[in-house]
Amino acid sequence: MIVAYHSIFCAYGFWLPNDPRGSWSDYVRSWNLYYAAGRATACGTRRSVAAAGHDHTARQQAKEILANAAVKFSTAHIAAIGRGFAAACDETAYRILACAIMPDHVHVVILRHAKTIEQVIGHLRSRGTKQLNAENLRPAEIVWARGGWNVFLNTTADISRAIQYVNDNPVRAGQRRQHWPFITPWACGTSPS
């Protein structure tokens, strides 16, 4: 039984559909990108492929072909997106156990909800964008990439491991650990309900 999810979703241009490490896409929408970097690289693994070796230069050249520049969130953008996520949690009582809003992608660990995980992530993205607009901080016309990864978490050990990974994500990137007011505390071994 699915108890929670570790969801990863990206800013526009962060993870391309034909990334050599794999992607969640089964097609490339842009012919220019298709001809330059090849077909989609759908990946069926539940494990992260982010650390897999690849040609960084080729990946950067592919990003330069995009119709719009890749989005990078500043500290102000990240704070506004966090306020948007808090609004979504207030509206629907999502129980987010961990969240890392990075300059080009987001990690959340969230307990299962009556809505599908795709609906929940859509709601978070929507409220994040709405808050960016309200604060006149929208970084681009297209803020978010389509799709994302949703890893099913079935045990307290899975959940604890995902929380640790998400909480450590900013630190691994040389940034400060993030603390969000919408986080629901989780103690290892406690019931998720």
Image (cartoon, helix red, strand yellow):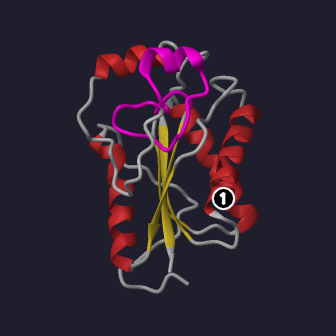
Q: Measuring from the top left, give residue 88's x and y in whole percent.
A: 70, 56
Label 1, residues with CA under 10 Å away: few <14, some 14-19, many ≥20 = some
Count up the numbered dots.
1
Residue placed at 44% from the left, 23% from the top? Answer: 38
Say if 63 sits above or below 147 in the image.
Answer: above
Choose between 23 and 144: the one closer to the eye: 23
The boundaries of the magenta stretch are: 12-39
Residue placed at 45% from the left, 42% from the top? Answer: 42
Q: Does the magenta stretch include residue 89?
A: no
Q: Decide if residue 171 is on the left or right side of residue 12.
A: left
Say if 181 sits above or below 176 in the image.
Answer: below
List the residue tagged with mark 1: 120
Q: Measuring from the top left, give residue 108's x and y in whole percent.
A: 50, 56
Quadrant for the C terminus in the image: bottom right
Choose between 144 and 97: the one closer to the eye: 144
Q: Is residue 25 magenta?
A: yes
Residue placed at 68% from the left, 50% from the top? Answer: 122
Q: Decide if residue 43 is on the left or right side of residue 27.
A: left
Q: Measuring from the top left, give residue 189's x and y in whole percent.
A: 37, 84
Q: Is the magenta stretch mostly helix, strand or loop?
A: loop
Residue ranking furthest to the left = 53
Q: What element carries label 1?
A: helix
Q: Decide if residue 68 is on the left or right side of residue 62.
A: right
Q: In which quarter of the image is residue 130?
A: top right
Q: Measuring from the top left, give residue 96's x and y in whole percent.
A: 54, 64
Kindly identify the amino acid type of the residue bearing the numbered disc 1.
Answer: Val
